[in-house]
Amino acid sequence: MKNRIRVLRAERQWSQAELAERVRVSRNSINSVENGKFDPSLPLAFRIADAFGLTIEQVFERDE
Amino acid sequence: MKQKTAADTALRFAIAALLIGWVVSMVWLAGQPDWVGSAATLFFLIAMWAVGAIIQARDDRRLDEVELAAVRFGARWGLVAGVAFMNALVFLPPFHSLLTEIAGFLDRTDGGFPRAVEGRMFLLGIVSTFVAQEACRALLVAGWKWSKR
């Protein structure tokens, strides 16, 4: 699943660690999700989207 | 993983303290009947197991879903990899010699609990299997996390 986490972080000047703290996961976990190596669960996806103040669809994209 | 608290640190110190306590008790009870030493060892073993279980439960509660996925992967495949590794070792003569030497070194016939070398080799084999499984599990967890970077 693709996502725009890196872009959204850069817009807000957040580090992975900062986003991890907001979402209550480890920095490594944010890194895995951001790089598309791990698909987050729905609750985690919602928390990430909420952290950016966006909807899930605005953060994550389905693989075609 | 969420941050450890002072309680987590204290529990880890407790494990070390129990280990030191066991060693001290063995020295202190050296002149006592064998059952006293066995009872003390059993007490410390149960205490360390209990504290270890509490530490593990507290650590598990702090894992996020990515870390949990890594632990699940390691638990599932660590057993398979560990058993395969031990089966491979079984066919290596140097490993047999090592177990035999360790079993012979532990042979105590002047006091203690005398056991046949074969019995100790069997026990050492079981312990080696456990160690191999744990090592494989840890390696697999680390490998899974590295692959998700």
Image: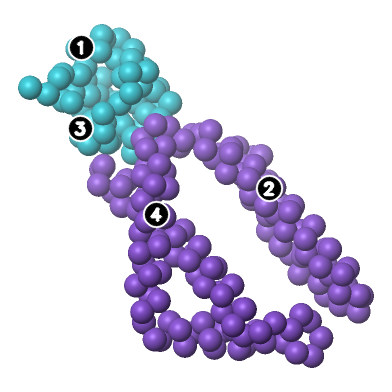
Residue that badge 4 annotates: B78
State which chain disc 1 sits on: A
The residue under label 2 is B51
| Residue at x-position 77% and y-position 60% | B42
- The residue shown at (37%, 56%) is B80
> Amino acid type of disc 2?
Val
| Tint applied to chain A in the drawing | cyan
Estimate the x, y position of residue B145 in percent, counting from the top left.
Answer: 32, 45
Q: Is residue B18 above or below residue A52?
A: below
Question: Is the residue at mark 1 from the same chain as the one at mark 2?
Answer: no
Residue at the disc numbered 3: A36
Query: Quick check: B46 left or right of B144?
Result: right
Give the spatial CA distance, label 4 vs label 2: 24 Å
CB-based contact (under 8 Å), mark 4 and mark 1: no
Q: Secondary structure at mark 4?
A: helix
Alpha carbons under labels 4 and 3: distance apart = 25 Å
Q: SS for tag 3?
A: loop
Colour setting: by chain
Q: Are marks 4 and 3 on the same chain?
A: no
Residue A13 placed where, x, y %?
Answer: 26, 24
Q: Is residue B86 left or right of residue B62?
A: left
SS state under label 1: helix
Locate residue A27, reporting x and y percent. 35, 35
Residue A57, disc: 1
Viewer can see residue A48: no
Instruction: Indicate which label's residue lies in the foreground, 4 or 3.
Output: 4
Q: Chain of mark 2?
A: B
Between B13 and B103, the one lying in front of the other is B103
Q: Which chain is purple?
A: B
Say which amino acid is labelled 3. Gly
Quadrant of the drawing holding the N terminus of chain B = top left
